[in-house]
Image: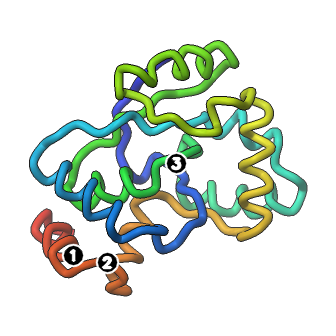
């Protein structure tokens, strides 16, 4: 199981705009603002996922990819964490799933708090890729964590203190 720190333009986010819970976002935002660590965000390299995209999504992804060459990972979970970290100008600590063994190892790390318990840990790498395909079929567009966060800021769908924090970083 390999871990890495990523920037928000390197991660393709899930299509859950805006995030589902303002309360959870606020909780993570406050932790991030005060420098607390949050659990790793699970990601899969785009080269693995793209093999599982259906033809229509693959075409859309190729277009997205040409405009977003830095986006190299698909996020499996962590919309609130990635948004909060981005609003606070922090890197996103991620765990990369490259094999089924990585997922098993991550599942064992739940007790440490470095990994959050989630249904993705009950699925193989291939099953997670199929889940991503189904997820994006429902809302067939792609965006990075950075793009999603900027959209949330610009459309003012998050609290003003979060918007102010983002702008304080020169964004």
- Between marks 2 and 3, how big is the CA–CA gap? 24 Å
The reply, left or right, for residue 40 in relation to residue 140 is left
Say which quarter of the image contains residue 150: bottom left
Seen at 55% across and 14% down, the residue is 105
**Pointer 2: what residue?**
158
Say which quarter of the image contains residue 119: top right
Q: Secondary structure at mark 1?
A: helix
- Between marks 1 and 2, how big is the CA–CA gap? 7 Å
From the viewer's side, name the closer residue of 56 and 16. 16
Seen at 14% across and 68% down, the residue is 165
Q: Position of residue 109 (x, y in %)?
A: 45, 19
Is tag 1's residue or tag 2's residue first in the polypeptide sequence? 2
The reply, left or right, for residue 35 in relation to residue 14 is left
Q: Position of residue 17 (x, y in %)?
A: 52, 72
The disc placed on residue 71 is 3
Q: Position of residue 64 (x, y in %)?
A: 63, 61
Is tag 2's residue or tag 3's residue first in the polypeptide sequence? 3
Q: Is the C-beta separation of discs 1 and 2 under 8 Å?
A: yes
In which quadrant will I find the C terminus? Answer: bottom left
Which of label 2 and label 3 is nearer to you?
A: 2
- Between marks 1 and 3, how big is the CA–CA gap? 24 Å
Question: Please, is residue 130 above or below residue 45 in the view?
Answer: below
Seen at 28% across and 42% down, the residue is 91
Q: Position of residue 93 (x, y in %)?
A: 35, 35
Seen at 29% across and 57% down, the residue is 84
The disc placed on residue 163 is 1
């Amino acid at each position: 199981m390999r871990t890495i720190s990523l920037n928000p333009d390197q991660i393709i986010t899930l299509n859950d705009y805006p995030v589902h819970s303002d309360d959870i976002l606020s909780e993570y935002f406050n932790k991030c603002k005060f420098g607390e660590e949050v659990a790793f965000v699970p990601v899969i390299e785009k080269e693995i996922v793209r093999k599982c995209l259906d033809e229509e999504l693959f075409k859309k992804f190729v277009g997205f990819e040409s405009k977003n060459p830095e986006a190299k990972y698909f996020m499996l979970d962590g919309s609130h964490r990635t948004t909060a970290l981005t609003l606070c100008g922090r890197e996103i600590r991620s765990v990369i799933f490259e094999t089924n063994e990585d997922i098993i190892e991550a599942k064992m790390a739940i007790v440490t708090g470095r990994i959050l318990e989630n249904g993705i840990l009950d699925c193989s790498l291939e099953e997670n890729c199929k889940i991503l395909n189904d997820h994006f079929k429902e809302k067939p567009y792609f965006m990075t964590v950075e793009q999603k966060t900027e959209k949330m800021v610009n459309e003012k769908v998050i609290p003003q203190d979060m918007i102010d924090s983002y702008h304080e970083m020169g964004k």
